[in-house]
Image (tube, helix red, strand yellow):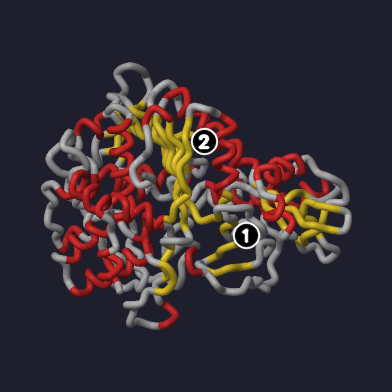
Amino acid sequence: MLRKLLRQSSAFHRQLYTTYLASHLAAPSPTSLRSRPSSPFSTSSSSSSQNPNATFVEHLEDAEESDSPSNTSISIDRSGLYNPPEHSHEPNSDSELVKHLKGIIKFRGGPISVAEYMEEVLTNPKAGFYINRDVFGAEGDFITSPEVSQMFGEMIGVWVMCLWEQMGQPQRVNLIELGPGRGTLMADLLRGASKFEKFIDSLHVHLVECSPALQKLQHLNLKCIDQDNVESADKRIISSLAGNPVSWHATLEQVPSGLPTIIIAHEFFDALPVHQFQKASRGWCEKMVDVADDSSFRFVLSSQPTPAILDLLKRCKWALNEEITKLNQIEVCPKAMELTQTIAKRISSDGGGALIIDYGLNGVVSDSLQAIRKHKFVDILDNPGSADLSAYVDFPSIRHSAEEASGDVSIYGPITQSQFLGSLGINFRVEALLHNCTDEQAEALKTGYWRLVGDGEAPFWEGPDDSVPIGMGTRYLAMAIVNKKQGVPVAFQ
């Protein structure tokens, strides 16, 4: 089954691989594979990479083994969560975040929106879920594609290099990642492309991250060193992986403009706060969070129209009537619309493009908000701040927001993650790696490959039934927003 999937590559894919990946492909060595032998969800992958274009250097550098903490066991991942929501049921005093939320509701004299609840739970400066700890990987609450295999970061790197070439190979480029997590994706991208000197030398890496804890982890995983800046009294931070300057920012607006820009947003939009609306006898009412008589949190419906109703009306304007009439609940994400407009305007003025990869729908999202704690679903209102909150990304609203923001950008997709990675050559990459690894590494490599591009349960799995790898290849979608001057980006052709 796996071999059949690997062979399902069109002539275009093979041509792309030959042109962009195959030249001087270094033979992978077992020591170069990222190994997590104890985990049924682990993968092994060399970061030895390939030549994306004759104008680039002879070959990509074989990546050294990742220094990120090894994942020894994972029970389940975000792409295959089917556990029913559960409560902790443990008596405990209110946390500082719970007291803060109740204080807001009391001060307001009424409930708060789901969006405000979500924003406080995730990014409250003192007690937000993302702020003070590492929430990724086996020891965290969920695992993302870059943690599954280094091949994911390598393929993103190929896409970025291809876009850079379409941009005319500018000498200076702002490479921005929104919500970079541990920094694994960016580390794999830089390590894999480190011998493409002209491309690498053009990059200034900008990481948009609000969590001090994650900033420190990104600094570590990118092997950053502080240097004296001869042009000013400030310190200059350099990633020793490929010698690129690295800067951190709380928001995209803080990243300096004026240079060609490439933006990566992987699993970023899903964490932006959503407003939920429910159809009632009096029309569409916003779902709110209130405090019940027993001091627990509960959902209630607004008694009067709320400001977010304007965002609902905008979303409904973009949808077909039959798409709306069959729904009893709708989610809208104004923050995603605003961010998309910011991205589109910057790409319009500075040139470049943005790649958005997330789990979501190519249509109106109904009721997708979920809470994940230790790789399991839990109740959204249970012990806020202890679980990740996320919602499906509404890709059509991203498209419409970008189109409204600027007529100088083109939007492509969404396509499935499987289609995206396959077009960039991941099938050939894994075939090459399978030729030179141990049986144990091959099994881990196949598992990681399936999780990135497969659909449903892996057919080759022979391990425990409760540990079968679940493919995220069709659950995750990819969309590109590019300046019209660049033409159609690779993988969306």
Residue 4 vertical position relative to residue 117 in the rendered view, above or below = below
Q: Residue at x 72, y 60 (%)?
A: 326
Of tags 1 and 2, the one toward the viewer is: 1
Give 335 or 328, whichever is nearer the viewer: 328
Sequence-first tag of 1 and 2: 2
**Quadrant of image for the N terminus:** bottom left
Whether residue 23 is visible to the viewer of this picture, yes or no, is: yes
Q: Which mark is residue 368?
A: 1
Q: Position of residue 281 (x, y in %)?
A: 87, 58
Query: Which amino acid, mark 1?
Result: Ser
Q: Alpha-carbon neighbours of circle 1 within 10 Å: few (<14), some, or many (≥20)?
A: some
The number of numbered discs placed on residues in the rendered structure image is 2
Q: Residue at (18%, 58%) from the top-left corner?
A: 32
Q: x%, y% of residue 418?
A: 38, 58
Q: Which residue is labeled 2 in the image?
A: 250
Q: Secondary structure at mark 2?
A: loop
Residue projecting furthest to the top? 231
- Mark 2, residues whose alpha carbon is within 10 Å: few (<14), some, or many (≥20)? some
**Residues at marks 1 and 2, CA–CA distance in whole angstroms:** 27 Å
Q: Which mark is residue 231?
A: none
